[in-house]
Image (cartoon, grey):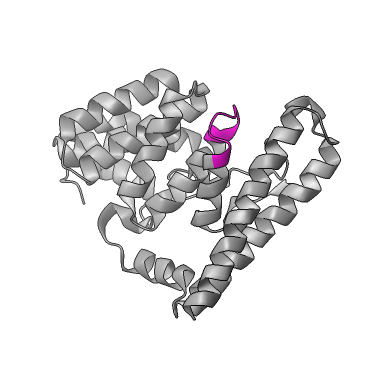
């Protein structure tokens, strides 16, 4: 059993090396972009298959464990507080990258196949990120992976990815996403209300209309600092952007009435 597991681990490592070699070939224009995209998809599938086999040999199914953990989550991390795709997910959860995301943008065409991060395991995405850490488009994949860690309650795994995004010349939307998550983690994970507010203020400087940052700051002010009235205009702005969010509407009414955070 150990020998079989070692074999599949070696196959995973080889596919990761092949992916890195492919990246270099594409950067140096040694192969056509269309060929690179096909090979990238093949290597990623090989990595997924290897990890699946390893999980089977270890007698566990990590995906089911993550799902069970998410269902047992409590408090704000249940993600039931608001529609994930609208607020908590923001751009990261909805993010879709091309299979050839590490190919020069000018070589990409609208008909390219799409790379959906949800198709791949955390291990595979970590390997791709490590092999392409300096690529200008890697921030998108980091945010997608970090959001997945957040949803499964793995805050310590998400934290370094958000920090890396901030250190790698993020676009304003990426900066707002990373800072808003870090601000939320400072409060929900560590109870650091003031640090959370300061971090969320930075997020709003990067993206003044970023709904996630607005919502998180409103909740931290209301539930963390006991400042319901200061939360009202922020919740109002979120509701203007997302008028169908009944949960936000209910929270706005409660905060406006001076009720305690629920």
Left or right, 48 with reference to 2? right
Residue at image location 80% in from the left, 28% down from the top:
29
Any part of residue 75 in sight: yes
Residue positioned 20% across, 38% down in the render: 222
Above or below residue 53? Residue 207 is above
| Residue in the foreground of this view, choosing between 102 and 219 | 102
In x, y percent, where is residue 211?
44, 34
Q: Is residue 131 left or right of residue 29?
A: left
Q: Nearer the viewer, residue 175 or 130?
A: 130
Residue 174 in the image, given as x and y percentages of width and height: 49, 29
Q: Residue at x 54, y 64 (%)?
A: 9
Residue 256 visible in the current orientation: no
- Residue at 64% across, 51% down: 116
Front residue (pair 140, 233): 140
State yes or no: residue 127 in magenta: no
> So how many labels did they put on this image?
0
Would residue 180 appear left or right of 115 to someone viewing this image?
left
In the displayed structure image, the side of residue 40 where residue 58 appears, left or right = left
- Can you give x and y, in whole percent of width and height, for residue 126 in the image? 50, 48
Q: Residue lying furthest front in this view?
A: 3
Dominant secondary structure (helix, strand or loop) of the stretch shown in magenta: loop
Q: Which residues are magenta?
A: 131-139
Residue 52 on image: x %, y %: 56, 70
Q: Is residue 146 above or below residue 197?
A: below
The quadrant holding residue 182 is top left
């Amino acid at each position: 059993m150990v020998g079989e597991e070692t074999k599949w681990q070696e196959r995973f490592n080889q596919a990761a090396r092949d992916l890195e070699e492919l990246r270099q070939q594409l950067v140096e224009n040694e192969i056509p972009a269309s060929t690179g995209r096909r090979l990238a998809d093949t290597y990623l599938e090989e990595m997924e298959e290897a990890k699946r086999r390893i999980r089977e040999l270890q007698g566990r199914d990590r995906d089911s464990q993550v799902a069970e953990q998410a269902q047992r989550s409590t408090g704000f991390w249940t993600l039931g507080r608001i529609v994930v795709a609208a607020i908590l997910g923001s751009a990261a959860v909805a993010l879709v990258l091309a299979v050839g995301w590490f190919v020069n943008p000018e070589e990409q065409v609208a008909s390219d196949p799409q790379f959906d991060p949800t198709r791949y395991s955390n291990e595979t995405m970590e390997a791709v990120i490590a092999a392409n850490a300096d690529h200008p488009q890697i921030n998108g994949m980091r945010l997608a992976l970090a959001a997945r860690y957040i949803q499964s309650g793995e805050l310590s795994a998400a934290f370094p990815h958000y920090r890396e995004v901030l250190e790698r010349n993020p676009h304003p939307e990426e900066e707002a996403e990373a800072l808003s998550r870090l601000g939320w983690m400072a409060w929900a994970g560590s109870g650091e209300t003031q640090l959370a507010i300061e971090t969320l203020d930075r997020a709003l400087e990067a993206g003044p209309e970023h709904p996630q940052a607005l919502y998180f700051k409103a909740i931290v002010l209301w539930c963390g600092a006991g400042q319901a009235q200061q939360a009202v205009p922020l919740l109002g702005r979120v509701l203007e952007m997302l008028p169908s969010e009944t949960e936000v509407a209910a929270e706005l009414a409660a905060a406006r009435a001076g009720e305690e955070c629920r």
